[in-house]
Image (tube, grey):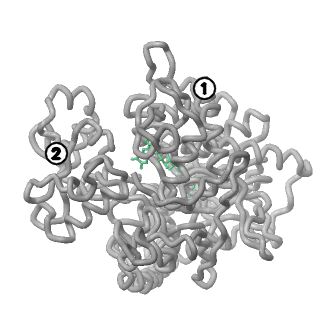
Amino acid sequence: MNIPVHKYDAVIVGAGGAGLRAAIQLSEAGLKTAVLSKVFPTRSHTVAAQGGVAASLGNSEEDHWHWHMYDTVKGSDWLGDQDAIEFMCRKANEVVVELEHYGMPFDRLDNGKIYQRPFGGHMSNFGERPVRRSCAAADRTGHAMLHAMYQRNVKANTQFFVEWMALDLIRDVDGTVLGVTALEMETGEVHIFHAKATLFATGGAGRIFYSSTNAFINTGDGVGMAARAGIPLEDMEFWQFHPTGVAGAGVLITEGVRGEGGILRNSSGERFMERYAPNAKDLASRDVVSRAMATEIKEGRGCGPNKDFVLLDITHLEPATIMKRLPGIREIAIQFAGVDPIKTPIPVVPTCHYQMGGIPTNYSGRVVVPQGGDYNVAVPGFYAAGECACASVHGANRLGTNSLLDLLVFGKSSGETMVEDIKAMPASHRELPKDAADVSLARIARLDSQKSGENVHEARLAMQRTMQDHAGVFRFKDMLAKGVEKIAEVEERVKRTEIKDKSKVWNTARTEALELENLIEVAKATMVSANGRTESRGAHVRDDAVDTPEHPDGRNDQEWLKHTLWHRDGNRLDYKPVNMKPLTVETIALKKRAY
Ligand SMILES: Cc1cc2nc3c(=O)[nH]c(=O)nc-3n(C[C@H](O)[C@H](O)[C@H](O)COP(=O)(O)OP(=O)(O)OC[C@H]3O[C@@H](n4cnc5c(N)ncnc54)[C@H](O)[C@@H]3O)c2cc1C
């Protein structure tokens, strides 16, 4: 078969914040750069980010990158790598100012400087009191950021392939990455993108769960492709649940609503957070609030006919305040919950929001794998950044506004590394292996010939229900073990999916079937990794590892201060040390994580 080949210096899969930031670096260095995206760049999930991007600019009060670093290590429950965290926090001011120079319309203080607001877990002076560190453009920070960077890329002549879906990584016999295969969604044809350097910036995979704040396109394609190509996945047991997703719809209601005075109530109208977090109450950290809500629901104090949600109440606020400070949220409540929050509380549930784990990288953006006793051997030609990557700066729990920062810092550093690596390579591309597209063609041929198989929607639903019930906010030993079995059963179904519509042009049934093959890899990695880690840390909390005599807060540093690596081959686990050594400062020593 004659497959069209497109030759580029660099190929980037993903046009969200991470992909666009890296592309600027490459195109402005004069390299021929292609960016592939399933959707128009400015529709990537980054567009939905509301709260802001963290940087210790100190525009309203004193701040320091070292304090930000401390907060991030603590937020990660000490699982984050301290070299990468120092790198990110030190670079924050530079990348935010750069973004401003690209034309990002930040909100301003009266003196003209960038406006900053407080956010959960961001403190001054090593954990003393909340500090204003989140740089924001109203409640549309991600939107503004994505547009500013897209325009900069158009100026730099980055070539966009919009509505193209990357299918598989192309690796040479020695493991070097030589590009990707991709489906042109409009025609249904498979093409090859042949590159000297390939970056994955494919975003999160929140769609493995039934209830998620993530866009429908967040199907973990990069993570799935990497796993199929033999790259182990790091720390996949750690998923952040946001306390307030609209029940049934999953759409996010920002933490800012509780910041404005919103209160969570159970079926008897009780402000239950007073029992769980007497000081911070409704504004305790995300994992604490989510677990309190899950407990209320589990113990029968949920609301509605099925007692499966709680209420977020702002009816005591002045209507004028709601209209001024939370207009977007009111609209979401009306549209997705059918209630006007001025008069009626909003039904909410903890909702899957963010994946802390992903494709293992170092802080230069290189993908690293274990080899001969060394855990950080770079895979030639392969890079990853953004939510699909694990650098690892978020460890077991990410702080709000640190993800947009991660996109800028590691988007830029991976772009810089790629420029450097490409410039050191011979002028001509390495030859493609003859079978470069075989895996992808076989996947498509299987779908084309499959008769009387599994329905894609039903198999996906079975996966999402299993993940929600067996690996949710709270985890239970027996449920995790059962979850591993159930996900293996779903995987068998995914191998036999059938699409009735075999046409080629804009066949969304086919793309959904292909996406499911990525989702299931993420689901397996999550369930198996969570089952393996028998402690509680950050977002991963197990019933058999809380309040034990040896480990009162569930965390067990003697045995578990290490990163999980899940290998698809053999569905097995392996572990690698956490890097506790920062670049220039002293190690932030282990401590109990309390707010
Ligand atoms: C509702 C919501 C609000 C948030 N608010 C904040 C906030 O205020 N502050 C903060 O720091 N973080 C926030 N986050 C988290 C943060 O927005 C995300 O982690 C981040 O935007 C992810 O960026 P990304 O560049 O990695 O991926 P994305 O922005 O998700 O982009 C992924 C890109 O990859 C492309 N892609 C995927 N698969 C393929 C494929 N197979 N082929 C081709 N292209 C592909 C997609 O088309 C897309 O262009 C929020 C997240 C959500 C869901």
Q: Is residue 336 visible?
A: yes
Residue 260 appears at what percent x and percent y? 26, 36
* Amino acid at the residue labelled 1: Tyr
Q: From the viewer's perspective, is residue 515 above or below residue 122? A: below
Rounded to the nearest angstrom, the CA distance separating label 1 from label 2 is 39 Å
Q: Is 10 on the left-hand or right-hand side of 319?
A: right
Q: Is 154 on the left-hand or right-hand side of 242?
A: right
Check the image and name the residue furthest to the front. 549
Asked where in the image residue 22 lies, by quadrant, the reply is top right
Q: How crowded is mark 1: few (under 14 residues within 10 Å), some or many (20 or more)?
A: some
Identify the mark nearer the N-term, 1 or 2.
1
Q: Which residue is located at x 64 percent, y 64 percent?
A: 578
**Relative to the observer, which residue lies in front, 578 or 492?**
578
In the rendered image, which residue does mark 1 sit on? 102
**Relative to the observer, which residue lies in front, 112 or 506?**
112
Residue 192 appears at what percent x and percent y? 70, 58
* Amino acid at the residue labelled 2: Asp
In the rendered image, which residue does mark 2 sit on? 313
Q: From the viewer's perspective, is residue 403 above or below residue 57? A: below
Q: Can residue 441 be seen in this view?
A: no
Q: From the viewer's perspective, is residue 433 above or below residue 125? A: below
Q: Is 6 on the left-hand or right-hand side of 15?
A: right
Asked where in the image residue 420 lies, by quadrant, the reply is top right
Q: Which residue is located at x 66 percent, y 51 percent?
A: 84
Q: Which residue is located at x 73 percent, y 51 percent?
A: 6
Dots 1 and 2: beta carbons under 8 Å?
no
> Tag 1, which secondary structure?
loop
Q: Which of marks 1 and 2 is in front?
A: 2
